Structures are given as C-alpha cells and as structure tokens.
Image (tube, grey):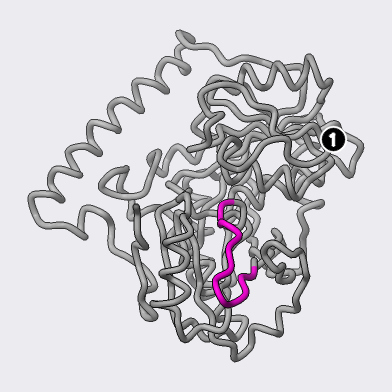
C-alpha cells in the first residue's frame, strides 16, 4: 500500500529531488540525469539525421505535451482542444498511452463517442475521464500511437487526432506541437529526471509551435512575465498563451449532483489527490475560500483502496466536513461510504487575460499550418 506523500497545511513546494536527499544520493541522482540526457540526445539524433522516421497519418494531428513530469494540466488542455475540434465539425479522436492502465501495452478502444466502454483500471485514469466527459469524442489507448492512430483513421474514419502527452512521442508526425509550461514550476529546477523534473532540456522547447503557460492565476504577475520571457528566449517562433484552470462547479462523487463553488467558502475540507503536482489543486481550493484541514497527497496515478480513503476520512481528516478531489482522481476513487461527502472540483481551460480565447489561439495556429 502506498500512503500519502504529504499531509501538511503549510506544504507548498518541494526542493528538487537531488536536494531532498543526502549528499551522496543527490550526486547519484545527478549522475543518472547525465546518463538519461545522453540516451535522450541519441534517441532524438536518429530522427534528426533520418535514421528513424515519423509516421504520417491522413488526419490533422495535434500534440499536447510538456517538458516536465506531471502537473501541468495536459489532460484538461487535451479535452479543450478535442472539444473545440468537434464543435467545428471534425471527427475527433484522442490518442493516449493510458499510463498505468491495463490496456497500455496493447490497443484498447476506451470510447467510440458514446462514453467509456471499459473501466478506469483498463483505460487509465486520464483516458477514462476524457471518455466520460467528452461523449462525442473517440478515445484510444496504447503505447504505440502509430497503431492506435491508424485504427482511428482506417476503422473510425477520424480526421483529427489529439495526442495526450505527445511531445516526447517522436514516432508520429504532427501538424501542431502545443507544450504546456506550469507557471508554478516552469522548468523543473533546470535539472533532468531523476535529479529534477525535466523530461527534456529547456532548449528543446524550440520544437513547439505554441507554448501555453498554465496556472498563471496561482503565482505573482511578475513570475508569469519571467516565465513568458524565458519561453520566448527558448522558442521565439512559438505563440505563447497564458492560461488558467478555471473552477466551474462541484460534482458529488457517485451521485452526479452539482454544487456551487461558493459552498466551499469557510468550509473545512480535506484535499485528496494523486497528481504530479498537487499544489495547483490545493491553492485553487484555498483561493475559493476553503479551509484546508488536510492535504492527502498520493503518488501520481495512484490506485486508491477503501482502506486508504477510510484512514484519510476518519483519522487524519476527522475535522473535515468534506473530502474534495479532482476529476482525474474521481475516476479511480472507490465509491464507499466515508461518513462525509466527497466532491469533485471541475475545471476548464481558460485565458488568463481577457484579450484572447482558446478559439482565437487554435484558429491562428491551424491557419498557420493550412489546416484551418
């Protein structure tokens, strides 16, 4: 059983992994990062010189990805882009690896445009959530997205594909690379994993057609400007859009009842999450006026057990009136009686400023590719 990583009212941000441990462990992590960097550059070099080739599909392919491990809000952005494409008459499919789902190593059709066909353990939490929320969009899971892409095009006649977490997936050619950079921790301590949070060096951002800064409302304005300036120095050709994950409403887990965000004001809640970066979720609850009496943080993509939830609800969060979680976590939470309600905080991607919108950004990006 994997217990919560963190349960602290004051915890906001952590140091880089190599700084959280002792001197020798930190040195070892840095050495592993160097080895990872070498393997990564060798992998990308094969594509640059033509030894490895990217598959071209007869469809518009848009990748939503990031430079760091977890926490940038990719899935919310993926859903927003997929919905935008569908509203403009496209036949849309989302291609996901289905990380930690049973279908990851094969090919699983999670949805044929009418909601989930399999459970979250098979699909993976993020593909299941997409299938549940976007009943008009196909969702396919599999590590080989060339295979799932061909299936989407040939069997289902889809003409627009969105790669969820696709920036590092080089085997499929794409028309647009949209990279998300989290304003809370933009460049992962400038260290590659496992010493830091970077999956690729910051200069690889130059491959992006667009960079969307996320969670801009959760940091100071000057921090947003600093992140934007660095992005433009690394990717001067990219369009930069500043975004927020805007809270929309609450949904009662298991019942579907909707609740107003105002109900959080002054209420004692336990924030329960298994995210790459739970800080954004917790800060959002605090900004909505909730009193966080417990922050129960589990590892990303964690499979919750009834015992764990009972321990959180009845012991460490005994003073909480509600348990509040994310839509992604709601896909995996067992629906058991915890003696207090469990609510899901629903969010959507929105602009940080009033001068642009998702529709504006997507229209300009696709016009630049000739796909509009």
Q: Quadrant of residue 2?
A: bottom left
For the residue pair 250 and 305, the one nearer the viewer reads as: 305
Answer above or below: position of 343 versus 80: below
**Residue at 71% across, 79% down:** 261
Residue situated in front as seen by the camera: 242 or 344: 344
- Specify few, some or many for label 1: CA neighbours under 10 Å numbering under 14, 14-19, or 20 or more: few
Coordinates of residue 242 in the picture (x, y in percent): 63, 60
Q: Is residue 233 left or right of residue 117?
A: left
Q: Residue at x 30, y 48 (%)?
A: 191
Residue sitting farthest toward the left? 24
334 in the magenta segment = yes
Considering every residue shown, the one lying at the far bottom of the view is 266
Q: Determine which residue is flagged by label 1.
A: 372
- Residue span colored magenta: 332-343
Above or below, comparing residue 357 to residue 34 in the picture: below
280 part of magenta stretch: no
Marker count (numbered): 1
Residue 122 vs residue 39, the one in the foreground: 122
Can you tell which quarter of the image residue 367 is in? top right
């Amino acid at each position: 059983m994997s217990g919560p990583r963190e349960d602290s009212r004051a915890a906001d941000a952590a140091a880089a992994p190599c700084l959280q441990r002792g001197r020798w462990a930190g040195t070892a992590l840095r050495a592993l990062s160097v080895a990872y960097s070498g393997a990564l550059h060798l992998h990308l070099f094969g594509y640059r010189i033509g030894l490895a080739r990217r598959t071209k599909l007869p469809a518009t392919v848009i990748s939503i990805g990031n430079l760091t491990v977890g926490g940038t809000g990719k899935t919310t952005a993926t859903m927003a882009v997929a919905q935008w494409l569908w509203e403009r008459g496209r036949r849309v499919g989302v291609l996901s690896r289905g990380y930690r789902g049973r279908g990851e190593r094969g090919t699983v059709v999670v949805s044929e445009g009418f909601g989930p066909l399999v459970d979250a353990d098979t699909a993976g939490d993020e593909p299941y959530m997409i299938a549940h929320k976007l009943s008009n969009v196909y969702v396919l899971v599999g590590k080989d997205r060339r295979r799932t892409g061909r299936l989407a095009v040939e069997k289902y006649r889809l003409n627009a594909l969105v790669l969820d977490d696709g920036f590092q997936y080089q085997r499929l050619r794409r028309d647009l690379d949209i990279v998300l950079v989290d304003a809370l921790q933009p460049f992962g301590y400038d260290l590659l994993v496992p010493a830091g949070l970077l999956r690729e060096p910051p200069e690889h951002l130059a491959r992006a057609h667009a960079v969307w800064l996320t969670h801009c409302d959760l940091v100071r304005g000057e921090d947003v400007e600093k992140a934007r300036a660095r992005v433009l120095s690394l990717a001067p050709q990219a369009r930069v859009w500043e975004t927020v994950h805007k809270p929309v409403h609450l949904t009662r887990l298991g019942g579907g009842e909707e609740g107003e965000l105002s109900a959080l004001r002054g209420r004692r809640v336990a924030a329960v999450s298994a995210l790459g970066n739970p800080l954004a979720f917790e800060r959002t609850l605090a900004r909505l006026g909730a009193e966080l009496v417990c922050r129960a943080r589990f590892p990303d993509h964690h499979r919750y057990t009834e015992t764990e939830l009972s321990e959180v609800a009845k012991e460490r969060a005994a003073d909480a009136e509600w348990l509040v979680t994310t839509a992604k976590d709601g896909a995996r939470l067992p629906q058991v009686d915890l003696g207090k309600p469990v609510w899901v905080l629903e969010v959507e991607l929105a602009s940080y400023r009033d001068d642009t919108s998702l529709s504006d950004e997507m229209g300009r990006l696709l016009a630049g590719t000739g796909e509009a």
